[in-house]
Amino acid sequence: MAAWLRKLLVAAEYPGDPERSVQSRLFTFSALVILVGLSVALANNVFAGGGRFALEIFVSTLAIIALLLAARRGSLRLSSVLLPVILVAFCFSELLGRDGVHDSAVVSLCGVLALAGTLMRWRLLAAFTLATVTIFYLIGYGEMSGSLNNRFSALTDSRYLTAVCIAFVLLAAGVRFLMDNLIGSVRKARGQEERFAKMIQATPAATTITRYEDGVFLEANRAALNLFARSREEVIGHTALSLGLWPNPEDRASLMQSMQAGDTINLRPVSIRRRSGEMRSTLMSAAWVELDNQKQMLMSAVDITDVHRAEELLRRSEERFEKIFQASPDAIVISRLSDGRYLEVNQRWVELFGYGREEVLGRTSLQLGIWADPAERARFVEQVVAHGALQGFETRFRKKSAAIIDAVLSADVIDIDGEAHLIVPIMDITDRKHAEERIQQLATRDPLTGLPNRLLLNDRLNLGINQAQRHGGSLALLFIDLDRFKYINDSLGHVIGDAFLRAVAERLSGIMRQGDTLARIGGDEFVVLLENIVAMEDAAGQVARKILDSFAEPFLVEGHTLSCSCSIGIGVFPSDATDSQMLIRDADTAMYNVKESGRGAYRYFSAEMNTRMQERMQLEIGLRKAIAERQFELAYQPKVNIGSGEVVGLEALLRWRHPEWGVVAPGRFIAVAEDTGLIVEIGRWVLEEVCRQLREWRDCGAPPVPVAVNLSVRQFTAALVGEISTAMVAHGVAPGQIEVEITESLFMQNAEEVRAILKGLSRLGARVTIDDFGTGYSSLGYIRHFSVDALKIDRAFLSDIDSSSQDLAIVRAVITMCRGLGIGVIAEGVEKEEQLEILRKLRCDEYQGYLFSRPVSAEEIARRYLKAVPGAKS
């Protein structure tokens, strides 16, 4: 009930409509005053007036209460119009009953019209006033005419009525005019408040209005609520201290003292604490303002927490950039794009270029002369401007010391204070360039002589052939092989051999024309490429003769005076070959033809040479197949004691029985086997086969007889002794049954290694014979330092011994010296009795040759010369 009465008696508020709020207050106040008056009148009429107007008063009271309820339900305007209507109706009922148009009736109508002027707008007011004045005038006219009688009827006249009606109109109009002014003022004030409120709400700064006396928040905009992290209900009506917004209350006290002292508070740093405990940094401003005639504080705060964080991040970023900038392993420079003036350089740049920072800042790279080629900077900047950034720009710089370095640059355009700058990392690639050049040199240059190698030769040869094809030109290729270089290398060692090759390269380089290519393609092989030659044969032959002539002069190498000749093969494009590999092959073929013909000369390639080369290739292929299919066999030639005529030994001789070619003579394939290295595997088979044959003869009861095996230079290695020992053990061959024959060229190799191998053979009981003595470079004085058992005089000295006194003298000298050294002598190639008789007189130890026996099979040897020993094990 109390709540209902409070709702009934308290005027309704309309926050968005100030005029309506004023009207609501006036209506409610007027209605309540009238209700009080009617209540008093009702009581007075009932108790003092006999209840004559009690019904009218009660009905009016109920009507006013109904209007109050209707106004509360939203019918304020209708209730405001009906309230004066009810009152005027009540007044006229009283006029008719008592005083007419005089006394209290006039006063009541004045009150009603004043109320109407307050609650009604102009049109309704005019209609209401007109109706009221008209009714009032009619009642007065009735009194004047005698139709209505009351105690004041005699006093009523037209002048009185006119004056009162005019007063009524003026009263209603005046009250309405005052109400319009009042409502206008309310509207203006409300508009200012709204604009102020909107301004506060719209400002991005956190803005609050607090009461001067106690600091209670009266208003707070959305930014303030966000700053405080609270709702509007949590803030309005509370103080900053009660909300815990000030982490240090002394700060607020200091601010209030400054405000009361009249100091200006503008952007003062203040910290605000949120409910969660998070601290926010703000810049606060404050001022006193008058609102509703009350002194209040307007405070504005700008949240700069994120700004501080951004500044801190920026500071840290700048610190990180500075650390990275200075610690970068690459040199970095920041320069102005427009003129290249240096803004900053890092420590690595200073170390790389050798300048101090004070020497370069404010100056340009062109002023410093850093670009080895100044035009490169213009090209660099042009590419940066075109693409906005740049990667992998290679150039060369000049250091302060004038040293030139290779560098690769990157670049990005950055904005500094509104101006375009370049940040340029510089990577020093000088060492990498040198390494690449070194790798390129290793890939395309001979490491010993520095000459082009086979790869670079092929590249230049292909380019030369392409150019010759386009222009109809010719070129020549000279294939140079040093004669007997192996003997220099083996006798004096690889160090001297390498130095000799360098000397040869230097001498050949001095002969070459500008534009010619001299290459070393391996070992002792050199190639000369002659391009753009018109008179091809004359030019190539002239260069070849110059080369041969240059080799006529000895080489002075590490204190050694060395002589060496060379063999040169010449191939011509396009007459001999149509591509590079064919041209090299043809020149190589021509060179081998020179070798076979005596060396120390040059020769052009011909079709006949190609035929011989094809035959050589067929021999190599056939040899490889012969090894796999065991197409080899051994023949044996007896060695005879000249004194007794007894067979004292055998020499195993290799034969190749090809399924299509028949028997291939050793002279055709041995050289090929030597060159290809196949002789090593063939020699291993010969050794194994001889040991097997010795075991077979032994098992047949034949007396033991030593068999000599010819060894190639390629076989004469540290592994030789082990291979012979293994074969002998595998077949049960007794010591002394294996003899080895070596050429004297072996003694030109490493002396210590040869001596060690010979001692190992001696321990196996293997007799060592020097074959073809007299055709090489050794001497008896040199051989005496090695463990050698016999010499075999070459057949070349025996063929004319019966008619040539010179050959006879040589043979006599060899036999005499061998006897003095305790070395046996064997003569080979004895075919006539006269030769044998001379050898007998010279006291030669043994001989072999067709005079006694041709080489025959193992079976024939056993049948003729190896008689079974009675009682021998079989």
Image: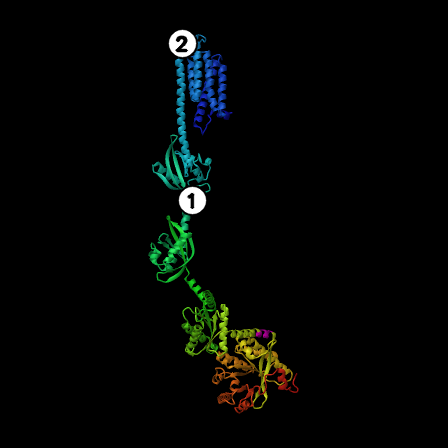
Residue behind mark 1: 306
Q: Is residue 348 above or below residue 253?
A: below
In reply to whether residue 625 is colored magenta, the answer given is yes
Residue at 57% in and 76% down: 682
**Residue 89 in picture, x, y percent from top left:** 47, 16
Seen as rendered, the residue at the extreme bottom is 841
872 left or right of 557?
right
Residue 402 shows in this picture: yes
Between 604 and 709, which is closer to the camera in this rendering? 604
Q: How packed is label 2: few (under 14 Cα within 10 Å), some, or many (20 or more)?
A: few
State the extent of the magenta-drawn residues as a range.
622-628
Rendering coords of residue 528 (x, y %): 45, 71
Instruction: Please tell me whether residue 713 belongs to the stretch shown in magenta.
Output: no
Question: Seen in the image, is 46 located left or right of residue 641?
Answer: left
Return the residue nearer the eye: 726 or 439: 439
Classify mark 1: residues with Cα within 10 Å, few (<14), some (14-19) or many (20+): few
